[in-house]
Amino acid sequence: MLKTINLKKVYPNGEEALKGINLEIPNGQVVALIGPSGAGKSTFIRTINRLVEPTSGKVYFANEKNDITSLNKSKLRKIRRQIGMIFQEFALVERLSVMENVLSGRLGYVGFWNSFFRKFPQKDIEEAFRLLQRIGLEHMLDKRADELSGGQRQRVGIARALIQNPMLLLVDEPTASLDPKNSRQIMRLICELCNERNLAAIINIHDVFLAQNFAERIIGLKAGEIVYDGKPSGLSEAILTKIYGEEDWSKTAAN
Amino acid sequence: MPIIKQKDYKTWKKFDRKRDLQNWLCWFLGTLIFSFCFGLISSKTIWFYVFDSHNEALDLLGRMFPPETNYFFTLIKPIWDTLNIATIGTTIGTLIAIPLAFLSANNTTPSKKFLRPLALFCIVSSRSINSVIWALLLVAVVGPGVLAGIIAIGLRSIGFCGKLLYEAIEEIDENQIEAIEATGANKAQIMTFGIVPQILPAFTSISIYRWDINIREATVVGLVGAGGIGIELDAQIGDLAWAKVSVILLAIVVAVVFSEWITAKIRKAII
Amino acid sequence: MNDKKVIWKRKPLIKNRLLRIGLILIISTYLLSVFLTTEIDWQRILEGIPRGKNFIFAFFPPDFITRSDEILAGIFESLWMTIVATIVGILISIPVSLGAAKNIAPKFVYFLSRGVITLSRSFQEVILAIFFVKLMGFGPFAGMVTLSLSTIGFFAKLLSEDIEDINKSQAEAIKSTGSSWFQWVNYGVQPQVMPRFIGLSLYRLDINFRESAVIGIVGGGGIGSTLNTAFDRYEFETAAAVLIVIISIVMIVEYTSSHLRKLIK
Ligand SMILES: Nc1ncnc2c1ncn2[C@@H]1O[C@H](COP(=O)(O)OP(=O)(O)O)[C@@H](O)[C@H]1O
Ligand SMILES: [Mg+2]
């Protein structure tokens, strides 16, 4: 489904954020990407849909011939519609209503003037209703995004990504701005939705415990390199130390 | 109610029918007003001149080039005067603006009924009247020359700085004032320890900002005789000496870019 | 008890002593040189005091009646000019400010737009007006073109700064949905800068009205022409009336616009 080959990113200031990532993700797999701050997690998922241009390497999406890194602008836009993205600070457009935020996920499918006058196809609107109902925010659809609480905002963010009808979800620390209870609910929601729709997902996450709880596969990133790739149960203290450095891990790796 | 229930399905629109109509009406009225205004302007316009203006412009540009570079040396004194008009004018303006701002700010004014409206009136009058008009008046009073320019710029700056400053004063943190009041400080002490430190940054950035604007303004007060490079500009345009005019214009651009550069530097140094 | 007295002094504004003394020196030299190089004709000023007094008294009482037709016509002309110039100026400013925002525009467009802004900001309205009057003839059209042009410099500069300050991740999120560039601007950027956009528009409307009073002096139409004529005819009572009218309109505009801005927020 997704395959990266020797993916590298060097920022203009010389920062080597990714040092050659090789990764393959099959259909429908939910992967947690863990690692300390600055490991390159955000950079990695952003090079996949080229919000950050990779310096070198290849990203194959959907099939072995479709290399995202070599697409022109309009083809890239078509690919971006098939990749949903969820952000740490929710990244809702705060001055737009909840409904507009959700519908903005369809921008890749409607023309400029239609989107300008907020004229979306009826089936998009129905899908938006369904998603809002699914995340339990149907009654809020008229509210402005900045009136919502953190957990509610992240739900809207999820709806916006899902209405794209994506094949892959890129999720950047979805719980970092949430309290523990909301964090678990959001993670559960994302994973349930992925299962329902047979969606593959890459979830960047700080919280090792949450990652172990919800993901089927864990990838440990450190200083731009993969240092672990395997089952959640395989995360031993030694490996956590390798990823995060010295610390007493006995309380976290509770499984 | 942007959810619209149809017979068998529901849909969504950004605005309901009423809001939609209102919006279109607003746009329609706006366009109408615009066309109406434009029509009035157009009725007082000789379109032949307007359509011919590009020829005129090319002609003018042709006369401006090449600029008479030697003329620049004659300009040094007027440029110096212009800078002085701006700098001294700004200084005077801000110094007078300070007490006015304290009189105008809701939280520091000693008398809400009498002094505050008076101070506000001074500020608004000073703001409403452009430096050139101030200069026009002052040239008649103190005679043509740099002094009239300085006073004109100063008078215009009072309102600008006064307004921004009193808004800054109204936004200060009351808790800090209370803390100082609680120590039993008198009015003057509250001022120096509670208020001044809080508005000092705003004050500096306002005066720098105004100085930047005043450089531009100081280039034109001369057009009505109040000193600076504007006097030269007026004279050379009067003489139709376009090759000299272009030198003046270049000098103005350089001065303005220079002042913008300096203010950016100072602002960075302060923050 | 300790023998040494502890002395506490207020922290000086500028820490470096050398810099402090240097600054004082520079400022006093500057003031001295200004004083020495500025020709101030004290004789003329002394003369001017009684003359100035007469001059100021000549303004009283303000005379709204004698030239009321001209004053009204001037005011309305200024209003038309202001409205048209503000709208035209803002419409042109929108693409310019997008071009002048570092985070949106490619380098080439960025420098081009910045150039346009700097050029339009360099010249005071009056200088621009002199040239446009020369090119397009006397009257409100030249004034309108002047005001539109200076609106661009002001508006595009401030709006582009606001665009550069937008929340990046909101814009990024819209981009990640596969939106086109225009959709991205419409959904990701525009909502974020809208409050500033409206505030600046009202502010500029106010400025344009005030400026219309001066560009008339050099032939750009509007209330400035009325004022200039009044001065030329030595009808200072009428001039005073015009000034009072300008001040009151500015007050009204300011009052309404600050209310509007509060409403919109
Ligand atoms: N825009 C940028 N310019 C320069 N360096 C950057 C930029 N974004 C991230 N980096 C650097 O790249 C490295 C990886 O960052 P990031 O991908 O954000 O890590 P993570 O998401 O794992 O915390 C960090 O060292 C960071 O400082
Ligand atoms: Mg990150």
Image (cartoon, coloured by chain):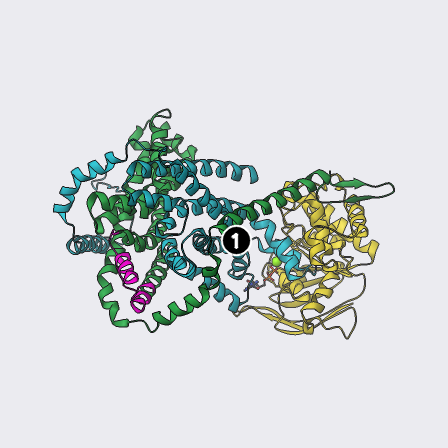
Chain colours: A yellow, B green, C cyan
Q: Quadrant of residue C105?
A: bottom right
Q: Position of residue C164 (x, y in %)?
A: 52, 56
Magenta residues? B225-249
Residue hosting label 1: C88
Q: Let me know if residue A31 appears in the view.
A: no
Quarter of the image with the C terminus of chain C is top right
Drawn side of residue B257 relative to residue C91, left or right: left
Chain for disc number 1? C
Main SS type for the magenta part?
A: helix
Q: Secondary structure at mark 1?
A: helix
Percent of width and height locating residue B247:
31, 67
Q: Is residue C108 left or right of residue A197?
A: left
User: Which percent across, then down, holds residue C1?
Assistant: 23, 36
Q: Residue at x 12, y 46 (%)?
A: C43
Ligand 2's image quarter is bottom right
Residue A62 in magenta stretch: no
Along the viewing direction, whichever of A143 and C70 lies nearer the viewer: C70
Amino acid under label 1?
A: Val
Q: Is mark 1 within 8 Å of ligand 1?
A: no
- Left or right: residue B12 versus residue B107 is right
Q: Is residue B247 magenta?
A: yes
Report whether residue B216 is seen. Answer: yes
Towards the viewer: B2 or C94: C94
